[in-house]
Image (spheres, rainbow, N blue to C red):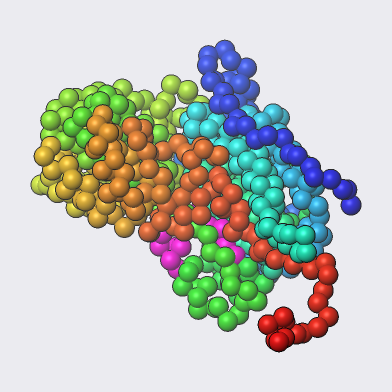
Amino acid sequence: MLKGFFNVPKAVNEPVKSYAPNSPEKKAVLEAYATMWNETIDVPNYIGGEEIRTGNTRNMSAPHDHKHIVGTYHLAEKKHVEQAIANALEAKDAWANLAWEQRAAIFLKAAELIAGPYRARINAATMIAQSKTIYQAEIDASCELIDFLRYNVEFMTQIYNDQPKSDSSVWNRLEYRPLEGFVYAVTPFNFTAIAANLPASAAMMGNVVVWKPSDSQVFSAKIIIDVFKEAGIPDGVINVVFGDAQMISDTVYASPDFAGIHFTGSTHVFKDIFKHIGNNIHTYKTYPRIVGETGGKDFIVAHPSANVKQVVTGISRGAFEFQGQKCSAASRAYLPQSMWAEAKDLLIKDVKSMKMGSPEDFSNFLTAVISEKSFDKLAKFIDQAKADKDAEIIVGGGYDKSKGYFIEPTVIVTTNPKYATMETELFGPVMTIYVYEDAKWSETLKLVDETSPYALTGAVFSGDRYAIAEATEALKNAAGNFYINDKPTGAVVGMQPFGGARASGTNDKAGSALNLLRWASPRTIKETFVTPEDYRYPFLGE
């Protein structure tokens, strides 16, 4: 084994490419988009060193053109999930015993592959199957994923370097062991970076993983798998199964070797996971680590002193980028009466100027929502707002699923601060605004804190530092990521560790060392250099 205290390359955030007209990156991604759009890929399950095709397949289509099939993927059976677990456990000892710098090299190589030869492909896949604009795909599938991989390597070395005090007689050491068993990663459709990071962060710390991607993200998941394989992740370290979530999860939770779950998804599902693990707790060799980032009902609250154009831009970007399908997306706003007339005009103007359509057209600000289920849910809430006396749609409100699942960016104004769309997570391009009396600033902050069960992200806009300080204190439990004079989205790895509490998750802060620590089981080693040979302490003498 190599000897040395090795320094890894300093992590630096990946620059976001512009994709300006005639730029080489625009040309490359459009070529990749056209090629991948016209191909039909077949995605197997990846278990150990095998590619397993069951013959029981589902189609992958583009949300902005749902009749166009871009590929199929194979559904795992229970026996395949059990095989994945067995293969993970078989690979565990070799992977855990591999020197940390060897693991680091794999993930640093993966980052570089995405930054270079895979960049156009992973962006195009995210555009096609998740309907992200090129900018949203670039900051997610490329930059954030690269940042996760690079910074997690740096965080890993920081963790390993964190050691207890010793003296001349005793050498104290902390060994950061991987968990005893395997980790289950369950990932969402909306961020390609999250889909890669959840299995990768656990694997980086020496764990083996069974990974179930979202059915709506298989297309870009295939690119992630290709990258991991080329980077050199050994067979069995990350096993990938597709299919029925309930069956896969039940099979995983039945294993005595289940050691933890890394989850991003709905609050309802996460609560069921907690319950299921609790019911099975006597089955497990160790107490499983339960790490989850779930829903949000993220807010913007503006003080009368705020710059109205900044507030409106925060709403327009925070609510409608990626069709509001970010767990951090702004979906409720509180604006003072004195600002409302100007803000309303500016917001209507903004929304009416937003183009919507295929991500292949770079002039589109929005594309389609992810699925018909999501479309139908959003259409129902929009129709209800049209009928309710305490709500008014001031712009948007249209929808069409004849070719793709398109929901217009929609702004609802309500006189009821507890109106349904002020409380319920919609996960779509719908913003609800409540206009408060200027004198009721403090009361409004209390309202913001108490309206939603979630506590993921939130933002305050103000030119008054006393008001900012008051909001920061009053809303300290309302958001795990709190923004001052900025929209509540766009957390950057290494800069704004991401996660919330309450119904938004366990707040284990992806994009920081805090998350990686969850995938280690520390062991304290005390070595005494001169060992006593008599039980008698000095106080026993006369």
Which residue occupies 31% across, 22% down?
A: 353
Residue 148, image x and y in percent?
60, 42
- Compare residues 128 and 322 and report the one nearer the observer: 322
Q: How many marks?
A: 0
- Compare residues 278 and 240 and report the one nearer the observer: 278
- Compare residues 525 and 170 and report the one nearer the observer: 170
- Compare residues 376 and 501 and report the one nearer the observer: 501
Above or below 522: residue 384: above
Q: Which residues are magenta?
A: 260-272
Residue 269, image x and y in percent?
45, 63
Using the rendered view, name the quadrant where residue 41 is placed. Answer: top right
Answer whether residue 174 is visible to the viewer in this image. yes
Taking the image as shown, residue 180 lies to the left or right of residue 442, namely right
Answer whether residue 41 is visible to the viewer in this image. no
- Name the residue furthest top: 22
- Name the residue furthest right: 1
Using the rendered view, name the quadrant where residue 45 is placed. Answer: bottom right
Residue 431, image x and y in percent?
28, 40
Which residue occupies 83% across, 80% down?
A: 533
